[in-house]
Image (cartoon, rainbow, N blue to C red):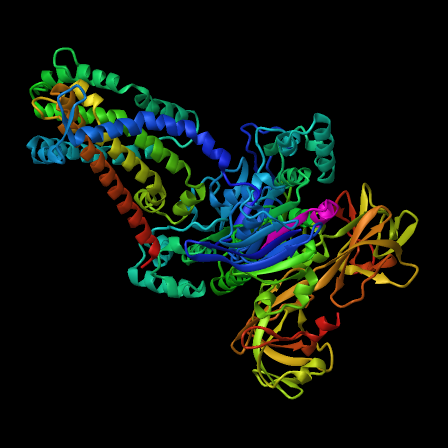
Amino acid sequence: MARIELKDLAHSYLPKPGGEDDFALKTIDLDWDDGGAYALLGASGCGKSTLLNIISGLLEPTRGQILFDGADMTHAPTTARNIAQVFQFPVVYDTMTVRDNLAFPLRNRGMQASYIKDRVQQIAQMIGMDSQLSRKARGLTADEKQKISLGRGMVREDVNAILFDEPLTVIDPHMKWELRTQLKQLHREFGHTMIYVTHDQTEALTFADKVVVMHDGRVVQLGTPEELFERPEHTFVGYFIGSPGMNLLDAKIDGNMATIGSHQIPLGAGYKSPEGHTQIGIRPEFVTFTTDASGLPVQVTQVEDVGRHRIVRVGFEGNTLCAVLPEGTPLPEGTQHIAFMPEQIGVFANDWRVTPQTGGAS
Amino acid sequence: MDKPQNNRAWFMVLPVLLLVAFSAIIPLMTVVNYAFNDTFGNNAFFWVGVEWFKETLESDRMWGALQRQLIFSFTILAIEVPLGIAVALAMPKKGVWASVCLVLFALPLLIPWNVVGTIWQVFARIDIGLLGYSLGLIGIDFNLGQNASAAWVSVIMMDVWHWTSLVVLLAYAGLQSIPDAYYQAAKIDQASRWAVFRYVELPKLKGVLLIAVLLRFMDSFMIYTEPFVVTGGGPGSATTFLSIDLVKMALGQFDLGPAAAFSIMYFLVILLVSWAFYTIMVNLDREEERNE
Amino acid sequence: MLELRDVSMKVRGRTHIYNTDLKLEPGTMNVLLGPTLAGKTTLMRLMAGLDKPTTGQVLAHGKDVTGMRVQDRKVAMVYQQFINYPSMTVFDNIASPLKLMGKSKAEIDAAVRKSAEMLRLTEMLDRKPLELSGGQQQRCALARALVKESDLVLLDEPLANLDYKLREELRAEIPRIFRDSGAIFVYATTEPEEALLLGGNTATLFEGRITQFGPATDVYRHPKDATTARVYSDPPMNFTPCRKEGGQLIMADGTSAPVGGAFADLADGDYRAGFRPNHLNLNAESDQSMALTCTLGIAEITGSETFLHLHHGDDKWVALVHGVHDFEAGSDITLWLDPKHIYLFDADGQLALPAAYAAAA
């Protein structure tokens, strides 16, 4: 297990990169603590796979350094990094039995047969495959194979880190639950440093203690799931986290008031008039319907019943906003008034969060 | 039902059916006809039943040719398949050199068979051939016309030169279809080169190798032109394989009846052996899948 | 209208679809929901006419089309993989089915532009598919399906290969796009949430059988049996054995609660209780709520909510509670369950008593 540091890291797929646009990975400085469970979250093309390949040693960065426990690993080959990786599609040795698959990384390192036997048994139990150890891997279902991949990643006790590259893509929703919690359990049990790459926010948030959100080759925020939800540092985080994402509205900011058209919206804190393109952001969970006429007048356009809650889409001043209503609350129709919880409103200037000057906890 | 299914499709196939009928079925029926009759020309036939088959089966000549044929086929398989895999493994995976290699390896496959035979015939000659002459210089008598083992070596080398490319191309295509993730996983597991081959590459190559073995077997079992040009089946009958023997019998001696019987059995043997090959390999596959 | 009458499908002795009857109305969205290998794709292929059923008939507008070739029917299909012609521009891709129909140039142009507009592809019409993002490629495939004005449009997990956020966007758009076309839409998915978001009707599939068919929220709130309830829940529904004695519902651990309403008419005896994870709460919702003591396996935080993976006796449960809670793994916590959220199933898994909250809704 190791602490991983990325220093001034940048990567371009072009031989002679010019401007910033040529870089798939713009400058990145990150520290991954030993034994942490991290998720790397972003849309496809945001550079998360590039970053993962640099950590695993498949790519050499154009610039910058990567350190494992202080030792420079930037140019070290994959084999020298002592990492494990689980891929998007199950990679198993088809002709081997489940047992041999799990034992393979240990045997290649010349471990003692008795140790291998015990360790394989232990891992097989953890992934729930101990009754199938003697089966050939090729006849297994996709999720069983992926369990073996997870197990093979986990089997070495001394790995510096385990990297997961969208490991649940091919898994059915019901199994996703099981595998994800199993993974978390394994993390608790063995304390490996884990880095989990995904575009799926649910997977990222539920798995990781700390989530790194990437957008356009940059890290836009590193935080706990709670921080990402409550205090997104960037409008992209607001949009990307949450389902539906944060409502963003162009607004003029003055002190503790936001102005949209002719409407005034009280904010939870005071702001010095920020420069640039200013917006307020509010999560659908914190939009409420009110009978108070001081609320914002809106037109309900669409209601989606998702079972445990309803997503209500409303039109307001040419924008579409979403509100989330819990199951069982009465359905609003036609013209309504909505209110925002003031302390949950975030203020953004040129897409970045503005820190309030006075008052408010946010 | 509004419309019978596939009606148009059958009409499309009709010309091909006619063509096949003229080019294959009718000649085949003629052969069958010859196999059970004797003729003295003038289209006069006498029914002889299975006489020709009996005669052929009892002749040492046919058994000798079959034995040589089997030795030849298995020898070239034993050389070409491992060699082809090895070459495919050594080839660059992408870039300009990959294309260059592919073109180079495809070349022997584009050369007409009689030309291949001629090339090797000349190559092996002791007076002007590079191979025969240089071997002569170091004291080895490499005379195709007199030395049976020299004839065999030439014929086998020629086939390997001509056909290993096919195995290379098939194996290369198979290797290309293995996702990078498998190699990376193996690297992370610190698998040795041999282990990567044994557990990643070979299992994924199985399908194409089955095809390669089948093709090479069937093809080599029917080999005619090249050894005919190089050795003419000699010295003696040392390299007289089944099809050379057949032609000698049919055209050289004009024994049409026994030749027809021979060719029917020849056809059945190829069918049988190919089927056996296929079944064995597919079954091996299934057994593995069935899990112990 | 598309009707499947006693349709079944067997391949080499294995049944892929058991005898099925299904009627789909024009202008409706019909979602086939079920896990992988439940038979969704097989069913779609039968509807399209790509395969011939082993038994039964497929009727389109009352006419028997069993065995009719797919080319002779107005069917469009969109797959999980983004299938476009790579060498053609987006315009030509969308126009291709119309060209095959031999429409005039002006007609084609108008139709292509209209559907491109709907799918927000107008800007991309001159580009080649491979220059587009995954979401745009799939929009192109959707536009091609739409432009044909088919009677039947089959969508086989069309969003499965897209990023989560793109999926969210297209999921909201698809019902809007197809609402006015008047065709029958069939949409296969493995995700309950997707089925609910798309609305329309849901058919739940499990192991080659349609277990229930009806409006999405109806099937979700009134599952006929435990299988349907399990298929139509994500996170999965919790199950536990229980007993009914008079007006009391007694759980396996002895916790009991009085239940009113239709419960009284139910025969005394053993049942299986089912309830959804979001109905387990950290505080009592009403006076009837039962306190259930569980051991926490692991807690997963989503930012605004927490998933608790629990052990209750021999049962494994999941609770979805509001807010962020970081409980210690292995600790005992009390969760409250209002009996009105409990479905009761009999020994065969058939619904014995619907949850009172759903019956009231």
Which is nearer the eye, B44 or C25? B44
Residue found 26% across the figure and 35% down from its top? B81
Residue C246 shows in the view: yes
Using the rendered view, name the quadrant where residue B233 is placed: top left
Residue B190 is left or right of residue B245, and the answer is right
**Magenta residue span:** C172-190
State the residue lying farthest toward the top.
B128
Which is nearer the eye, A67 or B290? B290
Residue B229 at what x, y percent from top left? 18, 18
Which is nearer the eye, A330 or A197? A330
Q: Is residue B84 above or below residue B100?
A: below
Residue found 89% across the figure and 58% down from its top? A295
Residue found 60% across the figure and 43% down from its top? C77
Check if residue A352 falls in the magenta segment.
no
Residue A234 shows in the view: no
Q: Is residue A5 above or below residue C221?
A: above
Q: Which of the image's four quarters has the C terminus of chain C?
A: bottom right
Residue B7 is left or right of residue A109, and the answer is right
Check if residue C185 falls in the magenta segment.
yes
